[in-house]
Structures are given as C-alpha cells and as structure tokens.
Amino acid sequence: MKKVLITGAAGFLGSHLCDKFINEGYQVIGMDNLITGDLKNIEHLFPNKNFEFYNHDVTTFVHIPGDLDYILHFASPASPIDYLKIPIHTLKVGALGTHNLLGLAREKNARILIASTSEVYGDPLVHPQSEDYYGNVSSIGPRGVYDEAKRFQEAITMAYHRYHGMETRIARIFNTYGPRMRLNDGRVIPAFMGQALRGEDLTVFGDGLQTRSFCFIEDQIEGLYRLLLSDYVYPVNIGNPEEMTILDFAEEVLSLTGANNRIIFKELPEDDPMQRRPDISLAKKILGWEPKVSREEGMRKPFAYFKSLSKEELYKSAHKDFSEHEHIRKN
C-alpha cells in the first residue's frame, strides 16, 4: 500500500484530496495546523485505519516516520481575507514550508506535487492564460504576499528538480468550488451564496465585468491526481475554461437560490485581476483531462451544503479570528 502525505488536509482542496486517495487505496497522512482548515472536513476519515492526522505547521521541521511515496503540498491560506491578515505566515508557508517538504521528499525519495495557483499570472495581459505566460504581478501590492509565495514555490520546486533530480509536479489551480468551502472566506461563490441565504444584498466589486472561470471540485481533484501520476515536471493549468462575468454569476446565484436580493456595487480591491481563464490545452494533451461537471449541476452541491449549515455558521463573521494562533499572527 503506497503512502501519501497531504498538507493542508483539513482545508477545502486538501480534504477532498484525502477522500480521493483513501478511495484509491492509499495510506493517507493528513497534516494541517488548523489556522484556516477545519477538522469537520476530515472527521469522517478518522475511523479509517488507513488515515492518520498530524496537527503540525509545515513552516517548522517536518518529519514522517517510515517510507513515503508521495507528498501533495496544499498548506496555505488561499483567501484574500486570510492572507491579508496573516501576510508573513502566508509567505513563510510558500517559502519555508515548501523548502521543508522538498527536503522531506528528497530524504524519502518521494514524488512531490505542489499547489500553485492562477494568481502567478497576476492581472494578465494575455487571455486565456497558458503555462508559457510569465504573468503581470505586483510584488509589492497587497496580494503580493500570496502571489509571490506561490511564484517562489514554483521556482524552488524546479530548482530541486534540476539540481537534485527529484520527481516534482506543479499544478496551477484556477478557481475551484464545491462542498466544504468556508462560507466566510470572502471568495465569490461562498460570498454570494451566503449573502443570498442570509437575505443580504449581493456585493459585486467594481462594475462586475471582470471575469472568472469556475471548476467543480470533483473535476479539479481528478486533474490533480492525474498530474501527480504523470511524467510531466513543468506547471500545468487545472481549471475550467468556461468564462463568465462576476455580475452574470451574481445573477445566476440569485436564480439558483430563488432569492430576491439586490446586487450592489463597491470599489474594486487593489490588484484584483480583471480576467481569469485557463488555457487547458496542455492538461488535455498530457493528462487526457478536462472538466466534466456542468456549472448548473455543480452549483447545486455547494448550495445544498451551505443551506445545511447551522444559523451560527451562516452568520459567522467573514473575518477569521487568529487569536488562538497569536504566535503566527505576530510572526
């Protein structure tokens, strides 16, 4: 039985990855310091004899006893609400955390896949974005703490591949949605659905004509799984190329929820990208992968998930409390 370490295991993507590898017959070690992750996302796996959980911060030394075949590094704040509040730790997870896990992969002779992001393209001047586009990123803007952490993550991963001959994989993940997203994390789908369920106005930033492309979680996980098992070492876009404006998406959420809420407009945040759409030609060619789940089908699942939340969870503040992790907030 092959063994895989998944960091960020209690998060949205990480928890679904744990499910995938358990279902594929792997022994899974989940690791998370629970700053933005939630144990309820993986508690159903605790009785499984092939699942272990380590509450650990990957920016400190990482040790796993015994053999290890694969590492998937998904530990990182991914919401602007979070990484703007803990910017230094966000940089440390991308830099020190990745360094530690690459060292572990080298020690164990394990293949490692890192979770990069479409944010490495910044506010793109090329559309759609293909892997050979270098991006348009502000290193000193407020989003730079996340963008540059991921760009460094890619650079050090390729350095380990070239210098040490290690088996590395890089996934550039575009907007993904599905059950287990944090309702209060500030991203488009949970934000709109939460506002609709609470009877609030839907907040659109700017004129709403900026575009995004949304990939359902099951499609995303399948793409990541195929990339890990492939022989391709350079970055690969994993996302859905179906593009729509934020304003159209707000109206679609209102239609789905049956709400009569208004749509209101607020100032666009600094460095917010105006276009985001993946060119997935490489994923089709290398992995034989493309999204299968339609947005109409996929959207019903997170809506049902959010609708099932308690009233307390539904009205929970969007600003996560990091007081339990004071050492991280200050360092």
Image (tube, grey):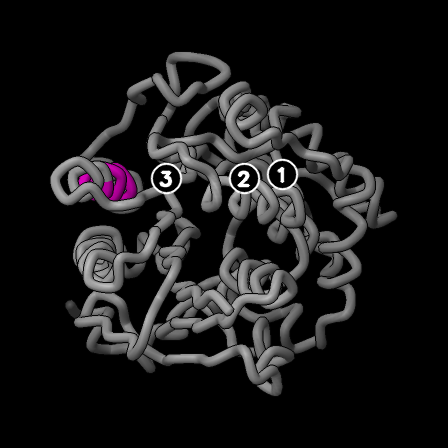
Residue type at mark 1 is: Cys
Which residue sits at x=58%, y=35%?
265
Dot 2 surroundings within 10 Å: few (below 14), some, or many (20 or more)? many
Which residue sits at x=72%, y=61%?
198
Residue 215 marker: 1
In the depicted structure, whether residue 64 falls above or below residue 93 = below
Secondary structure at numbered mark 3: strand
Secondary structure at numbered mark 1: strand
Q: Which residue is mark 3?
A: 170
In the depicted structure, whether residue 190 falls above or below residue 167 = below
Distance from disc 2 to disc 3, alpha carbons, whole Å, reads 16 Å
Q: Mark 1 touching mark 2, by CB under 8 A?
A: yes
In depth, the one of 99 and 12 nearer the eye is 99
Which of marks 2 and 1 precedes in the sequence? Answer: 2
- Observer-side mark, 2 or 3, equals 3
Residue range in magenta is 150-157
Residue 175 marker: 2
**Horizontal side, residue 236 vs residue 222: left or right:** left
**Horizontal side, residue 209 vs residue 78: left or right:** right
